[in-house]
């Protein structure tokens, strides 16, 4: 039993860190977040060359064929870099759901262009009720066409294909198809744009295995948790650096215990979120019985901890932390958007409760 | 990353499981209710049995009677112990903290003399570290040892000593040089608790019990061959003991917590919130789920720490997050129990209406000590700030 990373996993993570630091430094993050869709075609091609767009998809669809653990290591580093654009939406969200719900032909049709870097995708899930529970979905197909509204759809304007979760299945819709219109929603995280998407008799292809949706969403939630961990780590690093450099009363503020303890708590929260995210990924890769609970534990903890780490980080930065020029608030914005995406902590605690309180009495004996 | 048991780990588990199946006493639940003074000989006998099976200190090197078990095997060991609700071992501090310190710093003669009897529970050990004026600032301790021929003469007072009342030997930290900076004048002595001048008194704590003792040393003569490590290098020896305390303890705690949350979930099905059971109340469900999740994260943090220690060889200052995590988690867990049980939560042992014979009332009071004992949460955060994050020392 060993919970450390293997040599190849370390290598993948280190390479991703260097890649994002080189190709998408904060100056580039700030440039892209001011654009309409935060998408950069040149950066996307480079990510495809690295194999990032096909990381978890089968080699027969031109993917790399790695597992959920490798995916979350990549997402952690993307989160640390605050990578703008549709990597998460395309690979970890729509891609993972496609991979779990498509027939072999459908996967070939939709995943191969993603792996090759030729297409981007997203998932339209939440409706006006803003619920992440599939049972609450209202949108339904009618003679193979979709009509209705989806909200908070990430990166829809950069997507070539929109997966739609409906009452009666999961559908693939070409983003440029007649009857599809996207309208930006002005969210606080401008590195990941959100859209209001309307379907009016939009032609849609039904995916073969709708029962795969839950596992696809779990992979996405684990990936988003890992992305939050990366953001927390960066916030912690920036904060510790600042606490060492900033002087008041003639001393670095990091010398004061009130400041040290904030940083210590940031460290504890970041490491704990990382443990939970890594385990969720491993449980998904191994398809263990506790994988759904492990995912909810990871997303629940990361959702709360990322916000808390951001609060502490800004507090330690003092007035500097409240300025636009300081990067900490950009992570803070991402943390808030990701906190609610795919279910906030309250949603996942209730899911844990269903899995462990309502599943009696086997649980009580398992300790 | 592979959290499946390896072949060796599975073999280790199966072997211990079979041994436990044949040897674990079945009447522990009855004994558990009794005061420790009464059950102590029972716990000694249980440790003796583990010793005879070579299971008393699996983490120790083979030449000292252990099995050279990896950290993962140690975790498996404690998990198996918990699964069958095995009694604890009598010489907990000797096995967990002091034995490993003697193995690391002791002379051959000290190892030969002390280690086997720690294993067999023939000699029970206690730890003389904290003093009335040296808690968090341990290095400021004042108990002094003056060299007089072939003996040190010890005078001073220690406090918060677990197992002091039953201890045969004590790992005692004393000041041997008052004229150098405080960390540099300390020495560790191995002290026979039957020496003239040693007095042990019970210390009554806020739970009403006396889990700990105060110890007084008046002109206690300790032979120089009982110095552990080098004279005036006691700080290093003591810190090594404390690292063991912070590193390995969490492994068994998560199982205790897991049992507690399981019981709370069970209780939530029968204790009402209004007209319905607590288990159907959204707020109760949120709190139980949060607690369940944190217990799982505590386990995962521990496993990641084990993998890191296996790679680096030493339990580092990162262990401080485990101490903070488990102590604060237990306080949250006990509060949730109180909220769930409402006025029943306050009922102590002996009250006919008490839940689980007052376990939760006791747990609520006892957990207040968790963030203080074994290094306060504040000290642990200082350790993380300075030693892990590299912030400048605050004192």
Image (spheres, coloured by chain):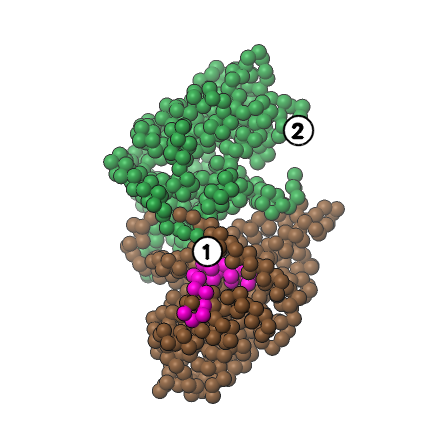
Assign a secondary structure to mark 1: helix
Q: Chain of mark 1?
A: A
Q: Is residue B203 above or below residue A147?
A: above
**Residue A69 magenta-highlighted:** yes
> Quick one: quadrant of the C terminus of chain B?
top right
Q: Is residue A55 above or below residue A238?
A: below
Give A168 or B5, whichever is nearer the viewer. B5
Q: Find the magenta span and give its range.
A: A60-81
**Residue drawn 44% across and 17% down?**
B194
Q: Chain of mark 2?
A: B
- Across and down, in percent, residue B105 comes to 51, 27
Q: Answer with left or right where residue A178 lies relative to residue B5.
A: right
Assign a secondary structure to mark 2: loop
Q: Is residue A154 above or below residue B345?
A: below
Q: Answer with left or right where residue A240 lies relative to residue A299.
A: right
Q: Is residue A365 above or below residue B207?
A: below
Q: Characterize the local packing of mark 1: few (<14), some (14-19) or many (20 or more) Cα atoms within 10 angstroms.
A: many
**Residue drawn 51% across and 19% down?**
B226
Residue bearing mark 2: B181
Q: Colour of chain A?
A: brown
Give A355 or A58, whichever is nearer the viewer. A58
Q: Characterize the local packing of mark 2: few (<14), some (14-19) or many (20 or more) Cα atoms within 10 angstroms.
A: few
* Mark in front: 2 vs 1: 1
Q: Quadrant of residue B383?
A: top right
Residue bearing mark 1: A278
Magenta span: predominant SS is helix
Q: Quadrant of residue B187?
A: top right
Q: Which chain is green?
A: B
Q: Determine contact: label 2, label 1, CB under 8 Å.
A: no
Q: Quadrant of residue B54?
A: top left
As measured in the structure, the alpha-carbon distance from the residue carrying label 2 to the one carrying label 1 is: 44 Å
- Across and down, in percent, residue A31 comes to 65, 71
């Amino acid at each position: 039993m060993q919970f450390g990373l293997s040599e190849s996993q370390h290598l993948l993570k280190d390479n991703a860190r260097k890649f994002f630091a080189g190709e998408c430094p904060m100056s580039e993050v700030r440039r892209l977040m001011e654009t309409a869709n935060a998408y950069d075609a040149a950066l996307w091609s480079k990510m495809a060359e690295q194999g990032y767009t096909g990381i978890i998809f089968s080699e027969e669809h031109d993917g790399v064929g790695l597992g959920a653990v490798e995916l979350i290591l990549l997402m952690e580093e993307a989160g640390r870099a605050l990578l703008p654009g549709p990597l998460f939406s395309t690979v970890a969200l729509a891609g993972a759901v496609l991979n779990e719900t498509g027939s072999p032909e459908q996967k070939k049709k939709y995943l191969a262009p993603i792996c090759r870097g030729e297409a981007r995708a997203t998932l339209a899930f939440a409706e006006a009720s803003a619920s992440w529970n599939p049972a609450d979905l209202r949108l339904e197909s009618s003679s193979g066409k979709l009509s209705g509204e989806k909200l908070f759809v990430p990166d829809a304007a950069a997507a070539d294909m929109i997966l739609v979760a409906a009452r009666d299945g999961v559908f693939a819709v070409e983003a440029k198809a007649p009857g599809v219109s996207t309208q930006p929603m002005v969210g606080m995280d401008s590195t990941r744009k959100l859209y209001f998407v309307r379907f009016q008799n939009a032609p849609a292809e039904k995916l073969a295995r709708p029962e795969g949706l839950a596992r696809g969403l779990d992979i996405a939630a684990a990936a988003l948790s890992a992305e939050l961990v990366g953001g927390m780590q960066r916030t912690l690093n920036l904060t510790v650096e600042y606490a060492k450099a900033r002087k008041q009363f003639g001393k670095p503020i990091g010398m004061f215990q009130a400041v040290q303890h904030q940083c210590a708590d940031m460290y504890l929260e970041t490491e704990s979120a990382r443990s939970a995210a890594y385990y969720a990924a491993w449980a998904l890769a191994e398809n263990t019985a506790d994988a759904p609970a492990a995912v909810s534990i990871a997303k629940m903890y990361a959702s709360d901890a990322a916000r808390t780490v951001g609060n502490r980080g800004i507090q330690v930065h003092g007035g500097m932390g409240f300025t636009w020029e300081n990067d900490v608030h950009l992570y803070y914005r991402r943390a808030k958007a990701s906190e609610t995406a795919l279910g906030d902590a309250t949603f996942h605690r209730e899911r844990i409760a269903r899995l462990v309180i309502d599943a009696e009495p086997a649980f009580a004996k398992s300790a | 990353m592979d959290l499946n048991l390896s072949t060796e780990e599975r073999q280790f588990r199966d072997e211990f499981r079979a041994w436990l199946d044949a040897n674990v006493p079945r009447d522990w639940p009855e004994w558990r209710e009794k005061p420790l003074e009464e059950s102590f000989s029972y716990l000694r006998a249980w440790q003796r049995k583990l010793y005879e099976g070579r299971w008393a200190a699996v983490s120790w090197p083979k030449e000292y009677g252990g099995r050279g078990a990896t950290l993962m095997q140690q975790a498996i060991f404690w998990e198996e112990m918990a699964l069958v609700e095995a009694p604890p071992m009598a010489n907990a501090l000797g096995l967990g903290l002091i034995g490993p310190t003697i193995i690391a710093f002791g002379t051959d003669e000290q190892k030969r003399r002390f280690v086997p009897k720690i294993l067999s529970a023939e000699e029970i050990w206690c730890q003389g570290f904290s003093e009335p004026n040296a808690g968090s600032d341990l290095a400021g301790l004042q108990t002094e040892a003056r060299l007089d021929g072939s003996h040190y003469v010890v005078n001073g007072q220690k406090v918060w000593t677990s197992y002091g009342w039953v201890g045969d030997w004590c790992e005692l930290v004393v000041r041997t040089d008052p004229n150098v900076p405080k960390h540099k004048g300390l020495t560790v002595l191995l002290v026979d608790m039957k020496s003239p001048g040693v007095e042990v008194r019970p210390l009554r704590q806020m739970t009403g019990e006396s889990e700990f003792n105060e110890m007084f040393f008046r002109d206690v003569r300790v032979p120089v061959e009982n110095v552990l490590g080098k004279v005036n290098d006691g700080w290093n020896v003591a810190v090594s003991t404390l690292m063991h305390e912070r590193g390995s303890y969490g492994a068994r705690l998560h199982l205790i917590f897991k049992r507690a949350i399981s019981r709370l979930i069970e209780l939530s099905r029968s204790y009402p919130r209004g007209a319905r059971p607590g288990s159907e109340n959204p707020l109760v469900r949120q709190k139980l789920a949060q607690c369940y999740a944190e217990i799982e994260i505590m386990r995962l943090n521990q496993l990641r720490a084990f993998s890191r220690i296996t790679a680096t060889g030493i339990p580092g200052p990162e262990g401080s997050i485990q101490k903070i995590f488990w102590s604060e988690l237990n306080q949250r867990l006990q509060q949730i129990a109180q909220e769930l049980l409402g006025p029943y939560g306050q009922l102590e042992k002996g009250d006919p209406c008490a839940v689980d014979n007052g376990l939760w009332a006791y747990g609520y009071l006892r957990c207040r000590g968790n963030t203080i004992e074994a290094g306060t949460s504040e000290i642990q955060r200082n350790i993380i700030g300075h030693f892990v994050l590299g912030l400048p020392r605050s004192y």
